[in-house]
Image (tube, rainbow, N blue to C red):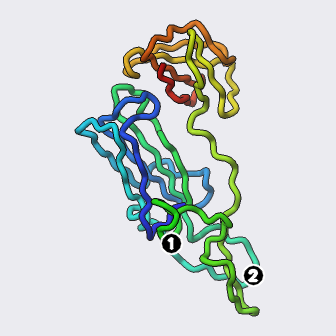
């Protein structure tokens, strides 16, 4: 949850997660909208490109609260009946990172995250960024005094399904020419691509084969990098495993 009256910092590594290379720059895209969580705008509401002239392998920090605060206009809800009001005073914020490296595969959405945004503030007791309350009630306290003849708006968060993992598959081991992996989400293809790099992720060679783990027959020299790539129109990657 993002409370726009308090800082909300994104920690952005300068190392691209797909190739493991240090980026020359990254682009942060922000999408802000109201309505269904899964229907984000096609074009970003705000974007920023940050260069990495010193080739740092550390991380950058961006406070997005001050940027997105202008996009929400708080209007108190008024009603005369008991009804469900769908978050008119809350918006969704989606952010994603594009990396510029020697590997063109890094220029895809990375660290894609969607958070609820509201016009509120934290007390600094939850760490660097505000977190949703455990009781899902978006008000301070649990006891409220209400006029028996009036109406009271009670804001709360509904439960959500478990988010999709960052990687569609995870390589757990590479040894003796075999790549061992697990699939993190349902995968309806009959084949999967194992990619190997001998030059720190600058270029990759591909081998398409069965989705049964382990896949064997590879050269697994020290320093080699392995990753999995999905087959189909939408391309997904696994983690990178360094031998």
In the displayed structure, 116 sits above or below 140; it is above
Task: Between residue 220 and residue 14, name the one nearer to us.
Answer: 220
Of the image marks 2 and 1, the number of the one nearer the N terminus: 2
Q: Residue at x 38, y 35 (%)?
A: 15
- Residue 188 x/y as whole percent: 70, 26
Q: Which mark is residue 67?
A: none
Q: Residue at x 68, y 76 (%)?
A: 154
- Residue 58 x/y as whole percent: 34, 41
Q: Quadrant of residue 150?
A: bottom right
Q: Is residue 144 left or right of residue 106?
A: right
- Tell me the CA gap for discs 2 and 1: 26 Å
Q: Nearer the viewer, mark 2 or mark 1?
A: 1
Question: According to the image, label 1 marks what residue?
Answer: 120
Q: Secondary structure at mark 2?
A: loop
Q: Where's the N terminus, which quadrant?
A: bottom right
Task: Between residue 189 and residue 40, name the one nearer to us.
Answer: 189
Label 2: few (<14), some (14–19) or many (≥20) C-alpha neighbours in 10 Å: few
Q: Secondary structure at mark 1?
A: loop
Q: Which mark is residue 81?
A: 2
- Residue 111 x/y as whole percent: 49, 42
Q: Is residue 24 left or right of residue 111?
A: left
Q: Residue at x 61, y 55 (%)?
A: 37
- Residue 99 x/y as whole percent: 38, 36
Label 1: few (<14), some (14–19) or many (≥20) C-alpha neighbours in 10 Å: some
């Amino acid at each position: 949850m993002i409370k726009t009256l308090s800082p909300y910092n994104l920690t952005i590594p300068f190392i691209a997660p797909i190739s493991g290379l240090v980026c020359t720059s990254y682009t942060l895209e922000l999408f802000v909208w109201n309505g269904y969580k899964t229907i984000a705008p096609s074009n970003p509401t705000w974007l920023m490109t940050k260069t990495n002239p010193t080739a740092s392998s550390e991380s950058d920090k961006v406070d997005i609260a001050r940027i997105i605060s202008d996009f929400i206009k708080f209007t108190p809800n008024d009603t005369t009946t008991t009804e469900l009001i769908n978050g008119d005073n809350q918006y969704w914020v989606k952010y994603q990172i594009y990396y510029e490296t020697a590997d063109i595969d890094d220029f895809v959405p990375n660290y894609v995250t969607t958070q609820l945004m509201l016009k509120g503030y934290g007390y600094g007791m939850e760490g660097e960024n505000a977190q949703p309350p455990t009781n899902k009630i978006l008000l301070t306290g649990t006891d409220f005094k209400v006029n028996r003849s009036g109406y009271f708006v009670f804001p709360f968060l509904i439960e959500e399904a478990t988010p999709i993992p960052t990687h569609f598959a995870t390589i757990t081991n590479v040894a003796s020419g075999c790549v061992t992996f697990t699939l993190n989400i349902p995968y309806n293809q009959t084949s999967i691509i194992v990619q190997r790099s001998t030059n720190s992720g600058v270029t990759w060679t591909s081998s398409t084969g069965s989705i049964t783990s382990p896949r064997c027959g590879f050269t697994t020299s020290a320093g080699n990098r392995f990753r999995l790539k999905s087959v189909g129109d939408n391309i997904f990657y696994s983690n990178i495993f360094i031998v």
